[in-house]
Image (cartoon, coloured by chain):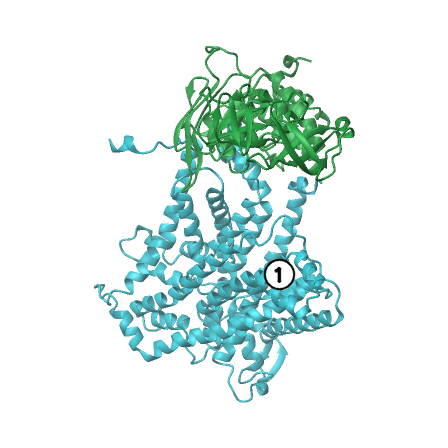
Amino acid sequence: MTIHDTKLTPAETCTTDPRSPYLGVKNLTKKFDESTALDDVSFDISKGEFICFLGPSGCGKTTLLRCIAGLETQTAGQIIQSEKDISWLPPSARDFGIVFQSYALFPNLTVGDNVAYGLVNTGAKRREIAEKVDGLLKLVNLSAHKSKYPAQLSGGEQQRIALVRALATSPGLLLLDEPLSALDAQVREHLRREVRALQKRLDVTTIMVTHDQDEALTMADRIVVMNAGKLEQIGTPREIYEEPATPFVARFIGETNVIPLAEFEHGHARSGRCWLDISQAKSADETAPSGTDVIAVIRPEDVLIAQKDCLNTVQTDILDVEFLGDHLTVHVHAPALDSDRLSVRISKQQALTLDLSAGTRLPLCLPSQALRLLNAT
Amino acid sequence: MIASLRAPRQALDNDGRLMRLFLLGYVAFFLVTLVLPLYALVSTGMTDGNGNFVGLANFRTYFETPSLVRSLTNSFQVTLISTVIVTFLAFAYAYALTRTCMPFKGAFKLIALIPLLSPSLLAAIALIYWFGNQGVLRDVMMGTSIYGPTGIIMASVFWTFPHALMLMITALSVSDARLYEAAAVMKTSPLRTFLTVTLPGARYGLISAFIVVFILIFTDFGVPKVIGGNYNVLATDIYKEVVGQQNFQMGAVVSTVLLIPAVIAFAIDRRVQKSQRSALNARSVSYHPKPNRTIDTCALVFCVLMSVIIFGIVGMAQFASLVKFWPYNLDFTLKHYEFNSAGVGWFAFFNSLKLAFWTAMIGTPLIFFGAYLVEKPPVSGPLRPFVHLMALIPLAVPGLVLGLSYIFFFNHPLNPLVVIYGTMGIMVLNTVTHFYSVSHLTAVTALKQIDREFEAVSASLKRSVLHMFFRVTLPVSLPAVLDIWAYMFVNAMTTVSGVIFLYGASTILASVGAIHLDEQGASASAAAMAMLIFYASVVVRLLHAAISRVLLKRTQAWRLAK
């Protein structure tokens, strides 16, 4: 089945310069009475991209989405959509479809009427509308529920209805405000795939707000990581995970060990009583590390059990072990380092060869190439 | 230059412009029905008989007149005593309804709401038949008179009881069972549990009920007029100054004196309401009482006693209106229902029906749509909070004060609206305004339960706000709309204080007629008129229940869908 079967037109035929971004956010700032919800946020989104706004609660990600929809107005800054300045347009004059965490389905209208809600005033004929509604419901496998009321459907079904209702008018931009957060874990994972597949198929530029990093990592083309109203980093899931630009990103996405560094000499850096080889470490900025505000971060899975040829060997004592099914996380105490706690990820097989009881000595290796240097401030 | 320095605002779409226009309409409405009349009232209090400004001279005169000051202390005295009694009784009754396993709870709740259906003066008339000079139980008064503070307090307690009860029931039904379990696990005694869990949980409801009842009694006119005797209170003073002595300036001064405590009480109540939020959260577990023979029996006895009193009051009014000549000839007659006394007839009753009908028909859509504008569509700026504040202010304005202020404002020769003076129109306007606040709050509560993102979804789908309103918001809120309609109707039927200054010879109302009949000594006819109002209210309430049922069945299938 192709898109044409369902009478859905792709979001918008591309007449503009393909290199110009579909959506541009420029220096967006939003101040509430005393707090700053958005602080000089800028980024571009290309057509057809799936973007996630990721951050802890209160970081401004929902405010940013609502500014793009026109549901909040920014204090300063610009929003450009399809080369048109929409910064001060009311929501009704913008081109978007939106899905909320609460589904926001109209309870007194049937599923079919909900989906048809935005189609009725497009000038389409009754029969065309009915066909389009059928097509859309088929798209999410809910044709059988057309004449039911929302309350008769499960949460996941309701959210799929909300999704096709938002897509019915073929908006150029789809906004999803934590759409999966209210659902059970299993339904959530299933819907992740379904939403992503639908988005790819319709090629609709999509922004999804989420606080769930797994959701962002699995679904997004690119992730916008936010903290305290500021944009911390924008990049592909891989970039965000492997090359965090700030300590916040390193700590927020996945688990990480943070090692404060003090002195730098000939490709080495001192932490506590240890000199670590950082000659192959990657750095977030190009300048050579110096000063006292530099930290090294390393993922638990990149920390190794020390072998003979390891340059950065650190003596540690085991504190405790967490069993996590497919692997174990060992928490150790490293008295020689400035950070006294490290986490190490060990596979089940490897664990069989080791004595992991608390208090046991465990020499660890922090490979130079796995270290990433970041400015702490 | 200056304009360019201002931060830009989001452009308004057609909907935004329309909503702003509607909001401006509401501002105009409140200016005409509330702000300007009250201004006219206060400023009249500061002029002499010839319209010259005299500042606070009238107030000085007021406070230098011992008889007037005595009314002020009288008002506070009877109001405080009655309020304490009502709060106590209502708390006990609500506790029995919500926290015990007493049988017949539904019936007891209905019985307790009966006083809402009659004008406040009905209780006063009935009490005179029970305890008056020729009353059945006059001996229990042991020589003291029912006319005066005793009667005012008893009648006030009767008619404000359901008001306090409803607030108490709300306060006591929202309680977290987990707190009681925690207390039980820690082996807390029942008394200590009551003092440390139950009372604190209900304290906002208690305070709120206390304040609401205080305002109701402090500003009530019907009860002290009928049973007050020579014991003067502020409300009767206003009536005497205006109707008796035609001293409008002093009437305005007394009104202002009456208005101030009411406004202060209102402000305190709003504060309390604000801090009440977040007492419960989604995780709270609702409390289910366990059977306890002693407590359940006590509750039952208490509720039966209260019910007997309520039936006794209403029943006496009914009985007295059906006997030939109390207390000498108790033969059955309908002659008191003929109303052939001067100026009051059956037409007064029909006028009341007309007033109630139009108040409900005009008030309900006006108030509901106003609440929608305040609650839902995205219009920034001060208009929405302003309209919301205006909508709440009538709660603090006593009916008598509002009515008097209408005289000053609408009867002013320069006012083009003078044409509605003395007509049914001005009474409808006054009654809608008088009962605006509670209905507004009902509507706002109902609207708050609707997903706040509907308007955003609708805008993204390019449908107008009005389409959204009629297609979704209104149908979903239908039960609240029907409640508002019935509330407006019944209150318009029973009100006295708001309209006592506003009726004309041909537009006299049943409630006002009852006052006049009582003044003329025809108390059996007054009781008959009060009973007519009572039965009309009962019929409307029953109709409301029936219509709600049918309408809800037909249009709210989605509610039952689950």
**Which residue is most to the bottom?**
B143
Name the one closer to the observer, B141 or B454: B454
In the rendered view of the protein, which quadrant contains the C terminus of chain B?
Answer: top right
Q: Position of residue A292 (x, y in %)?
A: 46, 32
* Amino acid under disc 1: Leu
Name the residue beneath numbered marker 1: B172
Count residues near mark 1 (Cα–Cα under 10 Å), then give few for <14, some for 14-19, many for 20+. many
The chain ID associated with circle 1 is B
Please say if A229 is above or below B255.
above
What residue is shown at x 44% (from left), y 51% (from top)? Answer: B391
Q: Position of residue B521 (x, y in %)?
A: 48, 78
The number of callouts visible is 1
Q: Is residue B478 visible?
A: yes
Tell me the quarter of the picture where residue A243 sits.
Answer: top right
**Chain letter, cyan:** B
Q: Position of residue A178 (x, y in %)?
A: 59, 32
Please say if B201 is above or below A321.
below
Name the one closer to the observer, A267 or B192: A267
**Chain letter, green:** A
Q: Is residue B93 left or right of residue B492?
A: right
Tell me the quarter of the picture where residue B551 sits.
Answer: top right
In the rendered view of the protein, which quadrant contains the N terminus of chain B?
Answer: top left
Q: Position of residue B203 (x, y in %)?
A: 55, 63
